[in-house]
Amino acid sequence: KSAVHKICAGQVILDLPSAVKELVENSLDAGATSIEVALKEYGQEWFQVIDNGCGILPCNFKVLALKHHTSKLADFHDLQSLATFGFRGEALSSLCMLGNLTVETRTKSELVGTQLTYDHSGVLMEEKKIARQIGTTVTVKKLFSTFPVRSKEFSRNIRREYGKLVSLLNAYAIISKGVRLVCTNTTGKNLKSVVLKTQGTGSLKDNIITVFGLSTFNCLESVTLCIANSCQVDGYVSKAGSGSGRYMGDRQYFFVNGRPIDMPKVGKLVNELYKGANSRQYPIAILNFTIPTMAYDVNVTPDKRKIFFSDEGSILSSLRETLEKIYIPSHI
Ligand code: ADP
Ligand code: MG
């Protein structure tokens, strides 16, 4: 039984970014308006997600990290529930399996906070009172230490996984409205650097300027299109003939209903058309697809970054038409 659980854990949490993503999504589900991701040695020693969300009720302390425990399953059949990020109760149990999990939390009904320590099978080992504000802090130490081979691979790839994580956090920074997002990394004895910081008070445009810079934003053109079945796409792409400014990180961010999603086909389409219009540089593309929740299935892959559209063909062809108008001059 335990072996099966371990295999499943490895599927939800593939790497550092997918681990942090689960925690950030839990914070968003908890209604947090401030989320801080703190890393020690790029996440290799430990990582922590600190939020000011609703906190965890004492009645959930014991079961919190057990497989399939979720407080979100109750309204599973309600469409609204599909709008929350997780509903399968796998993240915390998987993280227990893969490293050392502690949770600090307090709801508005408690006067003090509680620190909870779990063992690798998700059993609550220690519970003690602490002082803290309303919200939750989840800390994972030594991710993958329970898998020696994976652990070695993790150390070897740490800079790459860290890079992927920063770009994932950029994605949240771009799309999240009303959420303050901070990421810090502490290296050596006590050298703490701020990797990312957004106030989360502005529009998509403001967020893009924060992440990419104003000169890059000025090279972008806004895109809006409506597709049948009440699907809408909004965002920005590089203007035809423009460069992409000096921004060096990931250039393409796709979202479905505000959630970062890998959309290789969309990326390919933008690259293909842009290339037709000018240089070898990749265009920036930031596109949010607003789609009724019944028109797609987000839990298709365990890490929830790939999805199925029931009407992918028409979405892609409408997008192609819009982009052709931007990138292929004869289309104007
Ligand atoms: P899921 O998100 O699919 O429910 P998780 O394993 O990610 O499963 O989390 C288990 C449960 O722990 C959640 O349903 C929620 O009740 C609680 N939880 C986890 N993180 C937080 C958080 N940051 N704030 C409040 N509750 C949380
Ligand atoms: Mg979750």
Image (tube, rainbow, N blue to C red):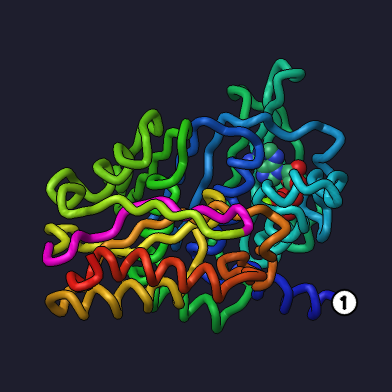
Q: Position of residue 203 (x, y in %)?
A: 37, 35
* x and y, in percent, of residue 126 in the image: 76, 43
Of residue 53 and residue 162, the one placed in the foreground of this image is 53
Name which residue type carries label 1.
Answer: Lys
Residue 145 visible from this viewpoint: no
Question: Would residue 91 appear left or right of 192 to someone viewing this image?
Answer: right
Vertical relation: 84 (above or below) 272: above
Q: Is residue 161 magenta?
A: no
Q: To which residue does mark 1 refer?
A: 1
Q: Is residue 214 above or below residue 255?
A: above
Callout 1: helix, strand or loop?
Answer: loop
Q: Quadrant of residue 98?
A: bottom right
Q: Position of residue 208 (x, y in %)?
A: 30, 46
Q: Quadrant of residue 328?
A: bottom left
Residue visible at 87% across and 77% down in the picture: 1
Q: Residues within 10 Å of mark 1 (few under 14, many from 20)?
A: few
Which residue is located at x 20 percent, y 48 percent?
Answer: 217
Segment colored magenta = 229-242
Residue 293: give x, y in percent of width and height: 69, 54
* Residue sitting at x 38%, y 63%: 162
Residue located 25% across and 64% down the image: 326
Mark 1 Cβ and ligand 1 under 8 Å apart: no
Please say whether residue 9 is visible from this viewpoint: yes
